[in-house]
Amino acid sequence: MATTDGDSATASQRLDKDTREKLVTAVRHTILLTWSFIVLFPLYWLASMSLKPPGTANSLPPDWIFLPTVYNYIQLLQNSGFVGAFANSLIMVSASVVLVLLIGVPAAYVLSRYDIPMERDVLVWILSSRMLPPIAVVLPFFIIFRELNLFDTRIGMVLMYVSINLSLVVWVMKAFFDGIPETLEEAARVDGATQFQGFRKVVLPAAKPGIFSVAIISFIFAWIELLFGLVLTSFEAVPVTLFVYSFIGSRSIEWGMLAAASTAMIIPVVVFLIAVNKYLAAGLSFGVVIKE
Amino acid sequence: MARITIDDVTKRFGDGDESIVAVDDVSLDIRDGEFIVFVGPSGSGKSTLMRIVAGLETQTEGDIRIGEQVVNQLGPRARDIAMVFQNYALYPNMTVEENMSFGLKMSTDMSSGEIEEAVTSAAEMMDIDMLLDDKPGELSGGQQQRVALGRAIVRDPNVFLMDEPLSNLDAKLRAEMRTEINRLQNDLDVTTLYVTHDQTEAMTMGDRLVVLNYGELQQVGTPLECFYRPANQFVAGFLGSPSMNFFEGAVEGGTLRADGFDFDLTEQMQSAVGTRNDLVLGIRPEDMTLHDRANSGHEFEAVVDVVEPMGSISYVYLQARSQSHDQTFIVETDGQRPISEGQHVYVEIPDEDVHLFDPASGETIHQRQLGEDAEMALEEQMKPAE
């Protein structure tokens, strides 16, 4: 009798445990699905809006079922302003990413490996460039750019983007280099490499995940920058964000074109992300890749 | 292969009052093909001294010679050395093969065929030839260690430097690799400097030990010499596991009055002690004997505090019954001897196994006796090499 009671008690406990696990799984899935919906719905909305026929993009109630058309995209491609601005942004942002890495990565390496007097102060000084809200510095920048003949030039915008991203690159890459054991370079030096060869052949490849991570983040920051583009360009060096913004008129908004241009803007970022994806997981954990 | 001379080398970190002396006026002559172990606790300067030989640190004063050449001004790449690091320092982005060939590519003008041949033969020697295409991240700790050694061997250098290379391995693997490194060093006959804080490694691996503490040279000698003829109390305490027991006491008419027991000094000891009033008596746990009852009157009573059975032997932690301070000492006994905590036993300190040290300077004033054969063997070892 006692044994039977005991068995049934265990069985019901097991049932409870199974039910609990199922419940936990169900709750977890519900949360994840809700979160995915929150994240993905705006993107779906944007993409679907760009594929709606003219005049129906913002109709109320929304057309849930419609015949997709690439009309907005064709309009965009025929608009030389958009194509020019898109190319402008691609060139300026890519150049700025290359330049910011060329300056920031060696700087971070030096700050990580050498005893620099007042190193902490130097780091904070570098970071201080991002402490003021952009709106506070945009006018001084405008004056400086005009004086230096950088106004509405691609070079000017490249320098602007570099200044926006430099502190990020230096800080993140310094943390990354700190995580790479110094014995790697010492091993390279003992193996016959010069200090520079050790940096180039051993440290840089080991830092690849970090470099790609700061590259993609810098790319995104520069790619979506609007305020400086608005103030520091007028015609020649207009970035794509500014052009997208131009679809928002004072009286009306061209929803279809706006959605198509915004969707098109996502493409380079996604392509870049896919290209460097395999390095990102390690990079975003700030250098914890070296197995000791 | 080469001889290494370390001549009055001092290394200070920092300036002025805040400077730290990591290596304090060390001189040492390392013979061609010799296996030298730098041993000492952390902060003893052993790694710094090796890094100075490697050229990774520059000494503040003194000279380093490799072969006949003074290498003070030469960087690591010009010293023809190979080094194994504590964390292996394998290049994470390169395969095992690339790791091993990197040094040859950087420091020689060997053709790629010759490099491949050298790498293959070193890999076979280290039994890692099937790992050549793997990246370090895919290897176990033991395999990484083998690759690190392989990377050093393939260079065929004048000098091997090994900085605590086994400290990241588990105990079993460490014992295996210890034997392997010994075998390799014998086969290759390359002058080797090996840094460790592990006295077992030091005792089992080196031709000679260089015992360091606070940057100062404590003793240079064969492992047995340092063990049986320690130059001072530090060396005596550092080598041997568990450590030598030390008892401080005052000398009164030929008797050492320690806390909890008296010890009658032999005539030989008394003449060595001279006019000193204070002494430190040192005796190793394996040299003391435990009795269930007092036999000769030379024993003193002690209470068992803790027993650590190791299998064939047990370590018994004891406290002298009449001691006034809380001091524990260790005695090694037969593992089969029944003994338990709280038990009262009688401890015998044999005269012939006792070391005496000066409490102020730590210097050894009386060494233990050895059997005739052991004494002769040790004297043979201690003869200066030609």
Image: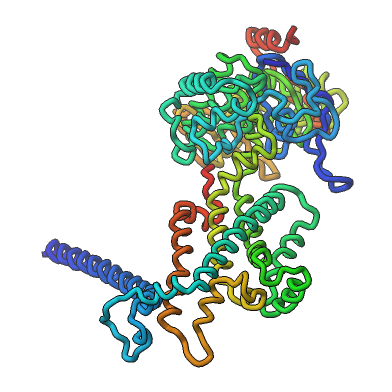
**Towards the viewer: A216 or A172:** A216
**Towards the viewer: B69 or B174:** B69
Residue A36 left/right relative to B41: left
Residue A4 left/right relative to B99: left
The residue depicted at 65 percent of the width and 59 percent of the height is A171
Toward the left, the furthest residue is: A1
Residue A205 left/right relative to A72: right
**Towards the viewer: A233 or A19:** A233
Is residue B285 among what the camera can see?
Answer: no
Residue A29: image x %, image y %? 31, 70
Residue A67's image quarter? bottom left
Residue B364: image x %, image y %? 77, 25
The residue depicted at 88 percent of the width and 47 percent of the height is B17
**Towards the viewer: B268 or B148:** B148
Q: How is the image coloured?
A: rainbow
Answer above or below: position of A232 versus B372: below
The residue depicted at 75 percent of the width and 35 percent of the height is B57
Answer above or below: position of B247 versus A218: above
How many labels sit on residues? 0
Q: Pick the quarter of the image with the N terminus of chain B.
A: top right
Is residue B232 among what the camera can see?
Answer: yes
Q: Pick the quarter of the image with the C terminus of chain B.
A: top right
Residue B30: image x %, image y %? 73, 18
Residue A28 left/right relative to B23: left
